[in-house]
């Protein structure tokens, strides 16, 4: 495969992940989507994206959910957690705090304060 083929594969992977953020996304499903073995896909993805697949998925889920927290005060944090594939709000809160250094409630409050 050429460099351009790998770039297309990464783009296709990103599209797949974006379309499936509400689900649990597995290495098996993503590698099947681009017709590569799990081993080869993971090696290539890590090389060209500078992060592992799980790091990428978590980062995208956190960034998208943070936007949602900022712009929609009516939806609960539990509902946002479920919308982004987390089984419980506690697992979402833990991942969110690890990524942003604060819990979703504080993030939402800060976003509201900055809008004023």
Image (cartoon, rainbow, N blue to C red):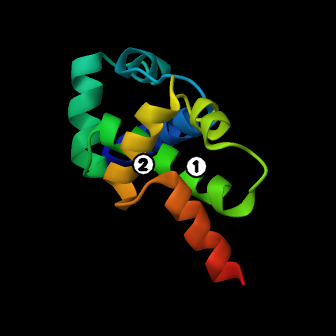
Q: Residue furthest right?
A: 74
Q: Is 67 displayed left or right of 30 in the figure?
A: right
Residue drawn 70% across and 80% down? 115
Of residues 13 and 114, the one drawn nearer to the viewer in this rendering: 114
- How would you rate the neighbour count of disc 2 (Cα within 10 Å): few for under 14, some for 14-19, many for 20 or more? many
In percent of width and height, residue 68 lies at 66, 53
Kind of element beneath mark 1: helix
Whether residues under marks 1 and 2 lie with C-beta atoms below 8 angstroms apart, the answer is yes
Indicate which label's residue lies in the foreground, 1 or 2. Answer: 2
Gap between marks 1 and 2, in whole Å? 9 Å
Residue drawn 51% across and 22% down? 87
Q: Is residue 10 above or below residue 105?
A: above
Is any part of residue 39 visible from this angle? yes
| Mark linked to residue 65 | 1
Q: Quadrant of the N terminus?
A: top left
| Mark linked to residue 96 | 2
């Amino acid at each position: 495969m050429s460099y351009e083929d790998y770039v297309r594969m990464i783009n296709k992977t990103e599209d797949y992940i974006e379309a499936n953020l509400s689900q649990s996304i597995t290495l098996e499903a993503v590698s099947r989507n681009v017709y590569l073995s799990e081993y080869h896909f993971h090696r290539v993805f890590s090389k060209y994206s500078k992060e592992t697949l799980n790091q990428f998925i978590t980062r995208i889920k956190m960034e998208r959910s943070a936007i949602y927290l900022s712009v929609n005060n009516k939806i609960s944090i539990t509902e946002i957690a479920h919308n982004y594939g987390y089984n419980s709000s506690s697992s979402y809160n833990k991942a969110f705090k690890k990524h942003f250094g604060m819990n979703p409630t504080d993030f939402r409050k800060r976003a509201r304060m900055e809008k004023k």
